[in-house]
Image (spheres, rainbow, N blue to C red):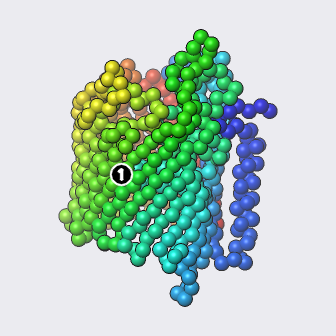
Amino acid sequence: MRTRPTIDGSANCTRERCDAQFLGLLAFSTALLSVRSSHAFEVAVDAQSQLQLYSVRSPFGSPTLSRQRLVHQLALDAQSDPPKLDESKVSWAFHSRLRLDGDYGVSSEERDPNNLAAFIPGLYTSPVDLSYGYFSVTGLLRDTTGIAIGRQILFNELGFWSFDGAKVAFSPAGLFELSGFAGYEQRGGLPFLSTSRYESDGVYRGNRDGMTAPQWPSYLNSSKVAPAFGASLSLTALRGLRARIDYRRVNQSDRVVTVPFADATGRLATFSGSRISSERVGAGAGFDIASRASIDGAWVYDLYRRASQEHRAMGTYRLSDRIRFNAGYQYRLPLFDADSIFNWFGARGNVTSYGSVTYQPVTAFQVTVGGGARWLGIGPRQLLSEALSAGPETGKDGFFRIDSSYFARDFSLGSGTLFESGSGGKRFNSDLWYRRNFLSRKLETLTLVSAGRWENPLFSERAQSSVTYVAGVRLFPGARQELGAEWEHVIAEGPLQRFRIIATATARFP
């Protein structure tokens, strides 16, 4: 059976082959569990399977989009037993999570480039990817140094990011932590159980082998890894005071299409050479004032474009045990990978300011009322070509939100309402949900009803109202097992309808 290249460079597999791969990984985890009794370490496994069935009917009755998505996740965590007081503080741990994401409802017509009525470019699945998998050792050099090797996820002021490589952290006497890492950014297009969900936006990366020149000329011919390195410094000595600075740079040398039109010979102009993909630095700081208030702020600067990408501040004040205030603002400028064509178009940032108050008269009930404003087209132009558009029009949006919830012994209910209006259009949404427990909390039901309307001045003909209802049930046959099912039905103007069924099964060990 011939396979077609996927967007991440791996080949699509049949259902039997995907399941065989995943079962092989499960067998490996089981083998590791079998040696638990003879070694001083602890192991935990978390397995989850989810089946999603979709059906969306066009306003014109045809075509109907159907999807059959089967997702398996397998997490394995192992760590050494905590050291005793008279033993070395060196310890190790291993963490991994595998994901199989197969969509068996994609038809052959949707993958046929000669069928222009149904063809969807880039509609390929990555059957198995390794979300993370790394081995770490802590307590080295008299409890000052730690090392982690493998596929890791970082979450700091620069955002959510993943890389394959090594990270070293140095923290003497808990005064501060200095860490550095080096490796390769996790990207789609490389055959290492990878995904593109963590990399910068704006560029499609995939294997062009077997594709003609006019097909997706924006593809990078991803055959080379993207070296990445960075460092961070955080203050840990002072209680109630937080401060850190992060730096990250990613390079690339894949062949990129520079002109999206073929010449007379059918060839596309390309460029290949080492260059910056992204380079940013970020800083964050915050402090607590007794137990009543806290203030946090952050700033991110794009070194490649020499522009501030983001700065934000947020404050919280607790007037009493019943009343809490929040206020803040955020400026954000849209930025993309250095090879993205979107960098040739004008862009300006936007500023959002907001505030809210939460009232909790009793432990079981609370209500939050908040609102704010959003200003579009704020800040300097970010243009690589002055001949192009200066970016979005300036304007202002206002928004208001109110949420409430009540929790009792065997049931809980809540509601939420959001309203936005301004130069960016109008949006209204209101929902009401109710949960109920039965059989000593071994059975849980969920009911949700939501209604809303969306309008945008750029797409006035697409203004739409919709109603959604959801009914779900979860069963807990044991302390570490869970079964669930959920039905969702969306009814919108058109008429447009969407049906979705989700079934889940979760098991944990030990």
State the residue at coordinates (47%, 74%): 144
Q: Is residue 271 visible to the viewer in this orientation of the structure?
A: yes
Foreground residue, 326 or 438? 326
**Mark 1 belongs to which amino acid?**
Gly
- Drawn side of residue 474 relative to residue 451, left or right: right
Quarter-wise, where is residue 442 in the image? bottom right
- Drawn side of residue 10 relative to residue 411, left or right: right
Residue found at the very far left of the displayed protein: 319
- Drawn side of residue 499 relative to residue 286, left or right: right
Q: Position of residue 233 (x, y in %)?
A: 39, 62
How many C-alpha atoms fall within 10 Å of the one at disc 1: few (<14), some, or many (≥20)?
Answer: many
Residue, disc 1 = 282
The correct choice, above or below, for 233 with respect to 333 in the image is below
The correct choice, above or below, for 375 with respect to 288 in the image is above
Foreground residue, 367 or 131? 131
Q: Position of residue 58 (x, y in %)?
A: 53, 23
- Drawn side of residue 168 relative to residue 301, left or right: right
Quarter-wise, where is residue 82 in the image? bottom right
Q: Position of residue 507 (x, y in %)?
A: 63, 60
Quarter-wise, where is residue 246 in the image? bottom left
Question: Helix or strand or loop: what does disc 1 sit on?
Answer: strand
Q: Position of residue 287 (x, y in %)?
A: 27, 64
Residue found at the very far front of the displayed protein: 273
State the residue at coordinates (56%, 82%): 88
State the residue at coordinates (58%, 60%): 149
Foreground residue, 86 or 3? 86
